[in-house]
Image (tube, grey):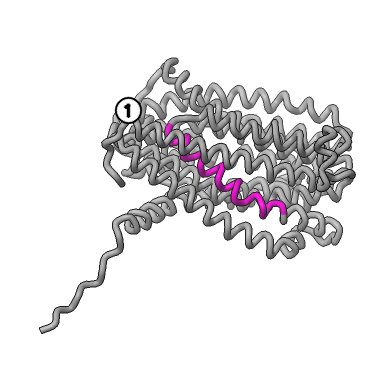
């Protein structure tokens, strides 16, 4: 009697690959939705201020630019909690996690107050800009009012990292979506004046942002306090004074990440200022391309946070082979998404630009920049996911230098030469047939970004290879994933 053969099982490595992709995606997608919701608050502020007046729109846009630079830098510094909690979770050292989180909250309080002072002082920038009085008033008011949100934002990012590193990413998503709706509602009340409130224009956006940042913190605390997933590591069960050695270790890990984030955000902000001399069309096209690519960037950024968590868990469990496997699966997944996004942007760059503006000239310029953005999708995804994996190893200084080199040594100087002053290039460079003789304006800066991000992506891939090998050499008998 013939036997019926069983369905062949997939190879072990295929099963492991599928399992890791699924684990990464389950961690990453709520982070992505939450990040998009947080960005949506700034989008809602700018959009609703624009319906108040052109001056309100300009003032809020300037205020949001300064606000974003400060909070993104602060967000990077507060990320030090992520790898530490992930390592303790992987090692099953749950009793160590509350201490780390409490000390990170102290750090958040100190740095949040410093950030508030920096944001208050940043209003001096607007005194040196040729702005209309109403625009200046709104920009200054936005920075001053939202500065009081800095301590809450820092504490929120600590809890964010704590939750993500335990594999609990849905709380941030749900809270962020709820706060986005709250932001839109408060803007509607205060910007235009409803339900008895006096219309405040752009300053209404500032008050809404302040209230919503505190609501973000309150919502996350409320969720965590009631969820059994946090019961065994709840950090607020007891009081603890600052522990300076732990604070120093947190700063040692977090400061390089903050510098990295500052280098990137300040580079893009500086590009907008440098191309302003070529007229509003160039600035508008730059902002359109930057806004759309920032939305796309949320996918690899969220994947980078998920990879950091997975790598940290493996290293905490003393399994460097699993850490290397998880890191490279994450990089591969990021590059796979980048191929899709690059193809989509290249094919749909015209319609994408037209969604932002009815001005044919601006749309044409934006479409040109979006084509360059499509080119750097692979290197951009590679650098952000790889940086997340390396941070999972609790290494942050080396990635900082790679990314500072990419943005401040390659992209900005080369962008200035290509975009504004090709005549200052050395003779050997100007002798090349492809080198432009006329300023390429915004396109020159974006071409330089392509090269800079290629340097960052390639450098971080080599660094990850070296770091993973070094950890394997320290534990040659670790089990395979």
- The reply to whether residue 109 is in sight is yes
Residue 452, by quadrant, is top right
- Residue 33: x percent and y percent? 53, 52
- Classed neighbour count for the residue bearing mark 1: other residues with Cα under 10 Å, few (<14), some (14–19), many (≥20): some
- Residue 173: x percent and y percent? 49, 49
Image quadrant holding the N terminus, namely bottom left
Prevalent SS, magenta region:
helix
Is 378 covered by the magenta stretch?
yes
Residue at (66%, 45%) from the top-left corner?
Answer: 42
- Residue 38: x percent and y percent? 58, 46
Residue at (70%, 35%) from the top-left corner?
Answer: 410
- The reply to whether residue 283 is in sight is no
Is 77 covered by the magenta stretch?
no
The total of numbered circles placed on residues is 1
Apparent side of residue 128 relative to residue 327 in the rendered image (left or right): right
Residue 432, by quadrant, is top right
Residue at (50%, 23%) from the top-left corner?
Answer: 251
- Residue 367: x percent and y percent? 76, 58
Residue furthest toward the top? 244
Magenta stretch in the rendered image: 372-393
Residue closest to the eye, 196 or 25: 25
Apparent side of residue 173 relative to residue 379 in the rendered image (left or right): left
Which residue in the structure is indicated by mark 1?
96
Badge 1 marks a residue whose secondary structure is helix
Residue furthest toward the bottom? 1
Residue closest to the eye, 162 or 3: 3
Residue closest to the eye, 306 or 54: 306
Residue at (51%, 41%) from the top-left corner?
Answer: 386
Apparent side of residue 351 relative to residue 158 in the rendered image (left or right): right
Apparent side of residue 416 relative to residue 411 in the rendered image (left or right): right
């Amino acid at each position: 009697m013939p036997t019926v053969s069983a369905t062949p099982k997939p190879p072990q490595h295929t099963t492991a690959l599928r399992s890791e992709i699924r684990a990464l995606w389950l961690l990453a997608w709520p982070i992505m939705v939450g990040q998009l919701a947080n960005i949506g608050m700034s989008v809602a502020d700018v959009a609703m201020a624009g319906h108040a007046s052109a001056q309100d729109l300009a003032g809020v846009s300037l205020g949001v630019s300064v606000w974003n630079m400060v909070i993104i830098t602060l967000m990077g510094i507060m990320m030090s909690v992520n790898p530490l909690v992930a390592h303790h979770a992987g090692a099953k050292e749950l009793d160590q996690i509350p201490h780390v989180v409490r000390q990170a909250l102290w750090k958040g309080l100190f740095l949040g107050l410093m950030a508030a002072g920096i944001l208050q002082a940043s209003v001096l920038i607007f005194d040196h800009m040729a702005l209309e009085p109403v625009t200046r008033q709104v920009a200054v008011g936005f920075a001053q009012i939202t500065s009081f949100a800095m301590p809450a934002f820092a504490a929120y990012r600590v809890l964010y990292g704590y939750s993500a590193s335990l594999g609990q990413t849905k709380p941030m998503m749900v809270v962020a979506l709820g706060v986005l709706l709250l932001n839109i509602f408060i803007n509607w009340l205060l910007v235009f004046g409803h339900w008895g409130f006096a219309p405040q224009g752009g300053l209404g956006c500032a008050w809404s942002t302040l209230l919503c940042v505190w609501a973000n913190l309150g919502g996350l605390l409320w969720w965590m306090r009631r969820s059994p997933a946090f019961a065994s590591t709840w950090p607020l069960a007891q009081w603890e004074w600052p522990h300076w050695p732990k604070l120093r270790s947190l700063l040692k890990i977090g400061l390089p990440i903050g510098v990295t984030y500052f280098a990137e955000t300040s580079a893009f902000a500086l590009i907008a200022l440098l191309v302003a001399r070529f007229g509003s069309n160039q600035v508008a096209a730059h902002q359109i391309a930057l806004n759309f690519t920032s939305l796309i960037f949320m996918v690899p950024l969220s994947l980078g946070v998920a990879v950091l968590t997975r790598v940290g868990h493996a290293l905490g469990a003393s399994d460097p082979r699993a850490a290397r496997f998880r890191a490279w699966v994450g990089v591969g997944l990021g590059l796979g998404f980048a191929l899709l996004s690059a193809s989509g942007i290249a094919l749909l760059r015209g319609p994408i630009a037209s969604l932002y503006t009815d001005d044919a000239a601006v749309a044409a310029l934006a479409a040109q920049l979006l084509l360059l953005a499509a080119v750097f999708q692979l290197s951009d995804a590679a650098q952000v996911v790889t940086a997340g994996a390396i941070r999972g190893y609790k290494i942050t200084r080396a990635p900082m230098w790679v990314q500072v080199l990419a943005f401040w040594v390659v992209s900005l100087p080369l962008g200035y030469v290509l975009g504004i002053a090709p005549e200052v290039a050395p003779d050997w460079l100007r002798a090349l047939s492809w080198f432009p003789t006329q300023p390429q304006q915004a396109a020159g800066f974006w071409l330089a970004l392509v090269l800079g991000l290629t340097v960052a992506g390639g450098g971080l891939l080599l660094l990850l290879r070296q770091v993973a090998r070094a950890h394997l050499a320290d534990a040659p008998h670790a089990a395979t994933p």
